[in-house]
Amino acid sequence: MNKTSRILITALLCTAAVACSKKVKEVPPADTGPSTAPVTDTGPTTPGAYGPEDLDSDACLRQRVVYFDLDQDALRPEFQAAMACHAKYLRDRPSSRMSLEGNADERGSREYNLGLGERRGNAVSSALQANGGSGAQITVTSYGEERPTCTESNEDCWAKNRRVEIVYTAK
Amino acid sequence: MTRPLRLLASFLALLFPFAAAAQQQGLEIDIIGGNASALPIAVVPMPYQGSGAAPQTDVARVIREDLARSGQFRGLPEQSMVERPTRGSEIQYPTWRLLKQDFLVVGRVVDAGSGSVNIEYELFDVAKQQRLLGFVVPARAGAMRDSAHQIADAIYEKILGVRGAFWTRIAYVTATGSGANSRYALMVADSDGFNPQTVVRSNLPLMSPSWSPDGRKLAYVSFDHNSSSSIYIQDLVTSARERVSSFRGINSAPSFSPDGSRLALSLSRSGNPEIYVMDLGSKALTQVTNQFGIDTEPTWSADGGTLYFTSDRGGRPQIYQASASGGGATRVTFQGSYNASPTVSYDGKKIAVAQGAGNVYRIAMLDRSLGSPRWSTLSPGSLDESPSFAPNASMVLYAAREGSRGVLYAVSADARVRQRLVLADGDVREPAWGPYRQQR
């Protein structure tokens, strides 16, 4: 997907989503990897059940990081497709287990950010369950601001650190 | 800072060239800022008198730096000391009056045999030509910094009428590496950052050190158990540790009650973080808050009756207070859109917090000792956090970011003097100032 169409899709999503009217000005993370692909993916309606090998090959399932806006735990609309396919994986593979690792950026209190990371983990857990995943397969852990992926004090870095990582503990 | 103050600051920076020697210990110390109303005091070098090799510790310098760091005193630089008396009978008062000194400390370090010394010191009021203190302090040669801090405490208390807090320890967390190579350590050091000792190491985050009131134990958060947060209490002498809380969800923000019998903490086992109090004997829990939202960072009033904590029940994090036995909470902070990490002075009159506005977080202090609550800003940084009062409330220790590393600062409660404690490598954060120490 080229840059122009990516911007177009972002713009469309923004027009549709109430979330964009938030007071907080946010720059979306530059590095969402293959995250733009699932927007056009019809993952959940694909016939056939997921298998463990799909975790490495399926473009939607490979999306294992969910990013959040500052001080927010609301799921951004671009992550709905990922929620749907991971929930389908949990349904297709009842023996699978996942850990949702919530994280925050460095600003503000470390202890409060531990709570914020958990809230984000819970938001992803709820979204997965709303898509038919079982809560019994999901564990939420918060690391607060203690495990940054990026250590500079700027908006790009902060956006990358406000995240939930989906970690399959049993495939 | 006003322009004259800034000039004074740069002047003081020249006067206190501590950095070189301190770096040998992996520590860099700068004094930033100055206090025009600070009391001038001359701490004259205390020479070693004995047959063996002289001890490494410069006792007079430790005392001088302690007093200067408090913001209450201005130490006369050594090079300005035209005379070097070592006992009261050698003092020529006109010299010290000419140097505009209010107080004078003289002394000497006398060999007492078998690795021990006696530090003999005297404190004088220059104007009155009167001796205020005169003591012989026995010390082991390897523990002379401890003795020097105790002497600084005695001088501070004699002149100001407030107990000194130099002979205390601080705890903090260091982090090195990133990603899978991250290494964390919980450290304890003297209040000036010297003598750092490792309490525990981990490949996973360590957080939230809290001192027991007797200074013998630290409570902290570790992720070693099942890669999720648990609270441990560790004995600093024996290194024995006990996991006291590992419920589902977050186990964090431990804080010992003033009598040491209870631990306040934040648990999210009910679905969102709430404040609880654990009886350390029975491990029984009392739930203090029950509110949708994040309630965390409990800290005790000196009488053990009240808990101050951070809550975002009103939308954004603010400080609240509640009875330690439960019941309703009242909001304490109304200035600033973000207030968190409360630390309360021993008399309950001052609360320091990390106060945020936009992308700027600074240490702010709410003083309730006057008629109406008054705020002051103690730190000039942009990502300052984790304030912790000294046991006498004269200073606040906090963490700041410089580039991509964390450093610690000690700032006087009047915000006029700051000292930076920088470890040579890695990121330093979450300082906790320990209690007064007891003579054994």
Image (cartoon, coloured by chain):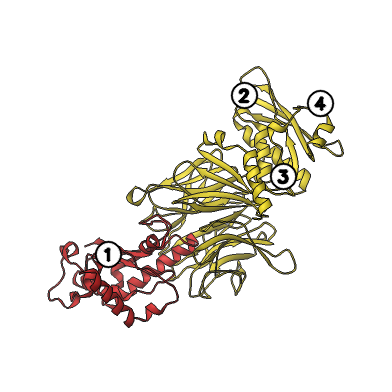
Residue B175 on image: x %, y %: 43, 48
For discs 4 and 2, the disc positioned in front in the rendered view: 4
Local secondary structure at mark 1? loop
Q: CB under 8 Å between callouts 3 and 4?
A: no
Dot 3: chain letter: B
Q: Earlier in the sequence, mark 4 or mark 2?
A: 4
Query: According to the image, label 3 marks what residue?
Result: B73
Work out how far the residue at label 1 is from the one at label 3, CA to CA, in angstroms: 57 Å
Q: Which mark is residue B328?
A: none
Work out how far the residue at label 1 is from the one at label 4, CA to CA, in angstroms: 76 Å
Local secondary structure at mark 3? strand
Dot 2: chain letter: B
Do discs 3 and 4 share a chain?
yes
Work out how far the residue at label 3 is from the one at label 4, CA to CA, in angstroms: 24 Å
- In this view, A103 is above or below B389: below
For discs 3 and 2, the disc positioned in front in the rendered view: 3
User: Which residue occupies 67% across, 35% down?
Assistant: B148
- Quarter residue B246 falls in: bottom left
Work out how far the residue at label 4 is from the one at label 2, CA to CA, in angstroms: 28 Å
Query: According to the image, label 2 marks what residue?
Result: B115
Residue B417 on image: x %, y %: 65, 49
Q: Earlier in the sequence, mark 3 or mark 4?
A: 3
Closest to the observer: B17 or B435? B17
The amino acid beneath tag 2 is Gly
Among all residues in the image, which is located at the extreme left? A48
Chain A's shade in the image? red
Query: According to the image, label 1 marks what residue?
Result: A64
The amino acid beneath tag 3 is Phe
The amino acid beneath tag 1 is Arg
| Image position of B87 (left or right of B148) | right
| Image position of A75 (left or right of B173) | left
Tell me the quarter of the image containing the C terminus of chain B: top right
